[in-house]
Image (cartoon, rainbow, N blue to C red):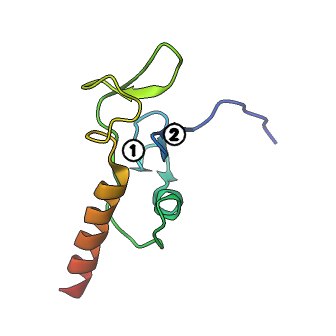
Amino acid sequence: MSDDATPSTAEINDAVFCLSHFKEVCTDCGTDLREENDGFFGFDFIDREGIEAPATGRDKDGAYQCKKHSSATCNQCYGWKKQITRLRAAAKKAGKK
């Protein structure tokens, strides 16, 4: 068993994404973090589209921040709960068709 200390995920303002592409669902990395993020924000998991982080960099302390506003807690760019809520509603609506 390999003891690889390099994380394969990145936490950005309380949501988790693949480290390479900053996607919640990444086919390249074989990552699906929707259930973890849904649970953190108080939702039961449903099959919905994944969220992606906008252009992201690191501040001088190493924390991830949006490039547009240079903020690690930017609710405009990192409003994950609002984005997840919208995607959940869309998934439920699509399931009713």
x and y percentages locating residue 85 in the rendered image: 31, 64
Type of amino acid under label 2: Glu
Looking at this view, is 58 or 33 the one in front?
58
Q: Identify the image quadrant of the C terminus.
A: bottom left
Question: Around disc 1, counting alpha carbons within 10 Å, would you say few (fewer than 14), some (14 to 19), or many (20 or more)?
Answer: many
- Residue 23, labelled with which disc? 1
Which mark is in front, 1 or 2?
2
Q: Secondary structure at mark 1?
A: loop
Reply above or below: 71 against 83.
above
- Identity of the residue furthest to the bottom in this view: 96
- Residue 11, labelled with which disc? 2
- Residue 49, labelled with which disc? none
x and y percentages locating residue 86 in the rendered image: 25, 63
12 sits left or right of 9 in the view: left
Type of amino acid under label 1: Lys
Question: Around disc 2, counting alpha carbons within 10 Å, would you say few (fewer than 14), some (14 to 19), or many (20 or more)?
Answer: few
Q: Identify the image quadrant of the N terminus.
A: top right
Q: Residue at x 52, y 64 (%)?
A: 39
Q: Are marks 1 and 2 in contact (CB under 8 Å)?
A: no
Looking at this view, is 21 or 72 the one in front?
72
x and y percentages locating residue 30 in the rendered image: 50, 50
2 sits left or right of 70 in the view: right
Reply above or below: 92 against 16.
below
Looking at this view, is 41 or 38 the one in front?
41
Q: Secondary structure at mark 2?
A: strand
Q: How many numbered markers are drawn?
A: 2
Q: Residue at x 43, y 43 (%)?
A: 28
Reply above or below: 77 against 39.
above
Mark 1 vs mark 2: which is more N-terminal? 2
Q: Residue at x 36, y 27 (%)?
A: 71
Q: Residue at x 39, y 44 (%)?
A: 23
Reply above or below: 55 against 81.
above
